[in-house]
Amino acid sequence: MSEALEDIRQICNEIIKRIDRRHVADAGRANEVPQKLWDAWVETGLLGIGLPEEYGGIGGDLSDLVHAIDWQASAGLNLQSAIPNFMSRIPVVKYGTDEQRKSILPATATGESRFSFAITEADAGSNTFKIRTSAIKQDDGTYKLSGSKYYITGFLESEWCLVVARTTPYDPENRTEGISVFLVRPNSPGISASPMDIGIHKAEKQYSILFEDVVLPADSLLGPDGEGLKVMFDCLNPERLIVGATNIGSADYVLKKASEYASTRAPFDVPIGSYQAVQHPLAAAKASTEAARCYLYKTAEAFDRGEKVGIEASMTKYLASTAVSQATNASANVYGGSFADMETDIIGFFLQAKLSELGPVNNNIVLSQIAQKMLGLPRGY
């Protein structure tokens, strides 16, 4: 472990001592950001992990970030509302102009400004190439943005949104061409957003968004016009690793809770944790969690070396979501009917685990990608 990473671990441990899981749980039930935890990430500099010092960050890389998120989530201190910040900064650092980087990035390290990311559309689903949101270049160099997005995390709470749009129509023969990424102000004229009624307690709100002839200045384009695929995946691949770290840490958290409960719960005079029917599912989930953690760190290190990690990032997401689903299901069975009691603090993780199987990127799509790209099977999607 590097000296810098050891420092980050010590900071995480101090935060864990200062902030109770109850604060995060209560904020989630109120559909609010856990402000004490957010402030702690700001004050300690953790919110600036992965951002170069010249732009107000503390430096470091994606490996440092996923370690920090994993450690915090293992104590139940999930800060999912910061995920769009972390994932969106990476392409801005890599592809942004000097002016974009200097004017936008510093405030994201202090918590004064937040990012959101808009790619998902109802009719396109996992087939991003078929998105309909368009950004048509005008004679004066501006772009006119029209279309819709949904399931966009923290859109109205953000100062900047990375919006993926088509600058040329979809062509099945050249489907990867014509995708561009824009830096958009959520309060721009022509944008309307509605909160979605999500049946789960989450700190971050989800929005459906409508863009109606939104005028974007020429300097809102991030990277080359029509060549936004690299920009987009330098956002999505880190997202899969960051979300994976959250899921892996969460899996550990619920497994610890369930194991402690199973060690004391004794309706027939011996702890239920002594039963193999209780032990084995928990143990299997722990094995899956540790395997996912190893692959997470391996993939993050490869990303930091500049290697292509598309399929590896998707596999990490799959392994992490599978692990947290195993963990929450096994833990729910340990608690029995009381797992549905909010005070038990399991059901929220249980529902979130199911959502993690579906996004970012559906696990069935990931399996199809693995089959095609790693096993050489015919493409079926």
Image (spheres, grey):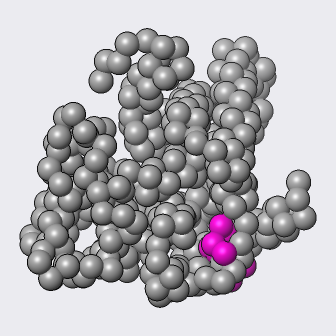
Identify the image quadrant of the C terminus.
Answer: top left
| The quarter of the displayed image where residue 224 is located | bottom left
Residue 138 appearing in the image: yes
Seen from the viewer's position, the closer of residues 202 and 172 is 172
Seen from the viewer's position, the closer of residues 167 and 253 is 167
- Against 183, is 189 above or below? below
> What is the span of residues highlighted in magenta in the rendered image?
40-52
Left or right: where 196 falls relative to 68: left
Q: Who's the residue at 66% across and 57% down the image? A: 62
Q: Who's the residue at 58% across and 68% down the image? A: 23
Question: Does the magenta portion include 46?
Answer: yes
* Residue 301, horizontal then vertical, whole percent: 72, 47
| The quarter of the displayed image where residue 205 is located | bottom left
- Against 166, is 142 above or below? below
Question: Does the magenta portion include 60?
Answer: no
Q: Who's the residue at 16% across and 70% down the image? A: 137
Residue 116 appearing in the image: no
* Residue 333, horizontal then vertical, whole percent: 56, 27
Seen from the viewer's position, the closer of residues 286 and 319 is 319
Magenta portion: prevailing SS class? helix
Seen from the viewer's position, the closer of residues 170 and 173 is 173
Q: Who's the residue at 21% across and 56% down the image? A: 166
* Residue 244, horizontal then vertical, whole percent: 58, 44
* Residue 257, horizontal then vertical, whole percent: 68, 42
Left or right: where 241 falls relative to 354: right
Number of marks present in the image shown: 0
- Against 8, is 298 above or below? above
Left or right: where 166 falls relative to 99: left
Identify the image quadrant of the N terminus.
Answer: bottom right
